[in-house]
Amino acid sequence: MIYINERISLEDNEVDLSAMRAQGAGGQNVNKVSSAIHLRFDIPASSLSDTHKQRLLDSNDSRITKEGILVIKAQQFRTQEKNKADAFERLQEFITKATHVNPTRRPTKPSRNARRKRVDQKTQRGKTKLLRGKVDY
């Protein structure tokens, strides 16, 4: 089980992992060890709700293919275990961010006391500025 948050979880068979050799600098370790991880998550075939699937597919992310498969390549670390954990963490972050709904904002008014205090502060400030003026003797 892959836990995204307290309401969303995925089965292990919904995520396809494959190991490959990482790119970039790293000396002999890069040429010998398959430490990079390719994580593939099929959004339309997943157990997520239809609204969550649609929100994921509607997110304009370059990692989602035309077929609706999310591809995450993790090759930042030297070990396969750390790259695997990084790939799962990025999947969790992606799903959490796409399925988060902001609560609706209710407009509020300032209270009568707050309005009175504001006007009092303005008049006090005006009096202070008036005292800075030229003095006639």
Image (cartoon, rainbow, N blue to C red):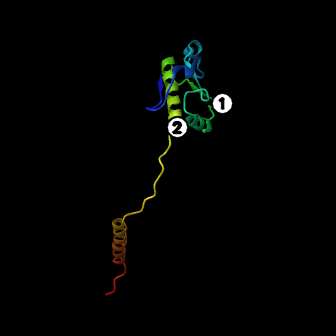
Rendered residue at 46%/32% (across/down): 7
Q: How crowded is mark 1: few (under 14 residues within 10 Å), some or many (20 or more)?
A: few
- Farthest bottom residue in view: 137
Q: Nearer the viewer, residue 13 or 123?
A: 13
Q: Is mark 2 on a helix, strand or loop?
A: helix
Quadrant into which the C terminus falls: bottom left
Q: Where is residue 64 in the image (x, y as percent from the top left)?
A: 63, 31
Q: In this view, does 27 lie above or below 89?
A: above
Q: Earlier in the sequence, mark 2 or mark 1?
A: 1
Whether the residues at callouts 2 and 1 have beta carbons within 8 Å, the answer is no
Q: Residues within 10 Å of mark 2 (few under 14, many from 20)?
A: some
- Asked whether residue 37 appears in the rendered view, the answer is no
Q: Position of residue 80 (x, y in %)?
A: 51, 17
Rendered residue at 37%/64% (across/down): 111
Of the residues shown, which amino acid type is indicated by label 1? Answer: Thr
Q: Residue 65 shows which numbered tag?
A: 1
Q: What element carries label 1?
A: loop
Rendered residue at 48%/23% (across/down): 85
Q: Position of residue 11 (x, y in %)?
A: 51, 22
Residue 36 sits in quarter: top right
Residue under numbered circle 2 = 99
Residue 98 sits in quarter: top right
- Farthest left residue in view: 137
